[in-house]
Amino acid sequence: MKKVITLVFLVTFGFVNAQEAFKGKGDIKVNVGANLQDGGSGIQGSVDFGLGENFSFGFVANYILGFDNFNGFYHGSTNPYRDAEPDFSDRFDAKARINANLSSVIGVKELDVYPGLSLGLHNFGAHVGGRYFFTDGFGVFTEIGFPIAKYGSNNDPFYHLNNQATFSLGASFNL
């Protein structure tokens, strides 16, 4: 029962003392968290810089730490893969991005919902995310990203790692 009361207190305290999620021009947000996708999981870091009341640009990088090895033939190749692992270029992705920050539009200053577009090493894509700040400097975020146009050819078994829908969640910081 003590744990339930403590949890209710912390959640109530967090919502009562929540702070503004996006302040506009000059605002800087940093997100660090887990990146989950089919065939692998890893870490994601991003930074967003406010340019106006509802607009920001930034950068995001992902690195896949855990992945599924590949065994067998890929796309009719005559050479079999045996316990193949992705190399660094298959595991790493970096993107520049723009966001439409909608906290003032939806009328909830503690919650920043941000759809956007990104241009990266592996694809051109889109994302939708949300940040909720419990204090002036700390919050949580979640984000879903997906490719619109993929670069390169589908000629290796790890092509899909950075060319599919991804889900991220973690901590968000206000600088």
Image: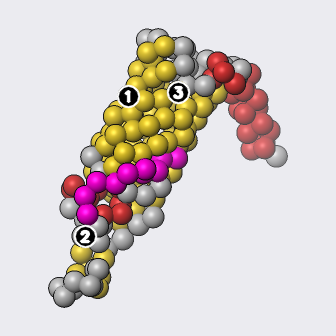
Q: Which of labels 1 and 3 is toward the front?
A: 3
Q: Which of marks 1 and 3 is nearer the N terminus?
A: 1
Left or right: where 160 falls relative to 29: left
Q: Mark 3 points at which residue?
A: 100
Q: Name the residue under label 1.
A: 58
Q: Where is residue 67 in the image (x, y as percent from the top left)?
A: 35, 65
Q: What stretch is highlighted in magenta?
A: 144-153
Tell me: residue 135, above or below residue 129.
above
The answer to whether residue 134 is visible is no
Residue most extreme to the left: 79
Tell me: residue 54, above or below residue 68.
above
Tell me whether the residue at label 3 lies in contact with that at label 2, contact meaning CB atoms closer than 8 angstroms. Answer: no
Residue most extreme to the bottom: 78
Q: Where is residue 19 in the image (x, y as percent from the top left)?
A: 63, 18
What residue do we see at 41% from left, 66% from top?
39
Q: Which of marks 3 and 2 is nearer the N terminus?
A: 3
Left or right: where 159 falls relative to 107: left
Q: Name the residue under label 2.
A: 156
Q: Where is residue 146 in the image (x, y as percent from the top left)?
A: 46, 50
Mark 1 to mark 3 CA distance (whole Å): 12 Å
Left or right: where 7 falls relative to 156: right
Mark 3 to mark 2 CA distance (whole Å): 35 Å
Q: Which of marks 2 and 1 is nearer the N terminus?
A: 1
Q: Which is nearer the eye, 78 or 93? A: 78
Q: Where is residue 60 in the image (x, y as percent from the top left)?
A: 36, 37
What residue do we see at 60% from left, 31% from top?
113
